[in-house]
Image (cartoon, rainbow, N blue to C red):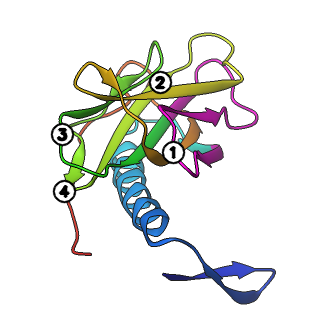
Amino acid sequence: VMFFRKNLQKFSIQTIPFWRAKFAIRASIILLAIVLVMSIMKPAGAAIAYRSVSSNNNAGGATTLTITTPSGVVSGDVLIASVDMKTAVTGSFSVVAPSGWQAIGSPMNTSLSKNYAFYLVLTSAPQASYTFQFFDGAIAYTSKASGGIIAYSGVDTNNPIHATSAGSYGS
């Protein structure tokens, strides 16, 4: 899969594995939908502002995915995580988020990949990173995965997610 990346006013072509491209596209679509809903539903007088983002993948596969906390986050910020896991077979797969994280809507699934979204309202100083765990039923499952955390300030921390929507696309 070829992606075009804008870099210093020049476009370059980057080749990435197909499964990573699919995850990146799906995660981007989910995060964009969440951000749009958050900005439409913000309280009067509040200005939602993007703070920073971080991402990671576990390349060859593991039972966890650790994502570094985006830089500059402070108490009162809202973090949104998108985690994609690739499965080799069908099963009862799930992603377990770190303590305090809440699921956003239902997971978006295709036959061999799953996308999960979570949010966290920071009520104290953030951790250095957050680790998401993969399971098939009650058994830890080794999966290729990628994900990201995006941080916003100015979000209504009492009701940070007003609506969700998920969809799937052809491959």
Q: Amino acid at mark 4?
A: Ser
At x 67%, y 18%, the residue is: 127
* Residue found 18% across the figure and 39% down from its top: 91
Q: Is residue 95 above or below residue 8?
A: above
The answer to whether residue 8 shows anywhere in this view is yes
Say if the magenta span includes residue 66.
Answer: yes
Pointer 4 residue: 111
SS for dot 4? loop
For label 2, the residue is 120
Q: Which mark is residue 91?
A: 3
**Label 3: element kind:** loop
- 39 in magenta: no
Q: Camera-side residue: 102 or 164?
A: 102
Q: Circle 2 — which element?
A: strand
N-term-proximal mark, 2 vs 1: 1
N-terminal label among 4 and 2? 4
Question: Quick check: 11 left or right of 47?
Answer: right
* Label located before the other in sequence (2 or 3): 3
Question: Which residue is at a point 56% across and 11% down the rendered structure image?
Answer: 123
Residue 146 x/y as whole percent? 51, 49
Name the mark nearer the viewer: 4 or 1.
Answer: 1
Query: Compared with residue 1, is residue 126 higher up or lower down, i.e. above or below?
Result: above
**CA gap, disc 4 and disc 1:** 18 Å
Q: Which residues are magenta?
A: 51-79
How far from the left and from the top, in percent, is residue 55? 61, 47
> Mark number for residue 61?
1
**What distance separates the C-alpha of mark 3 from that of mark 4?**
9 Å
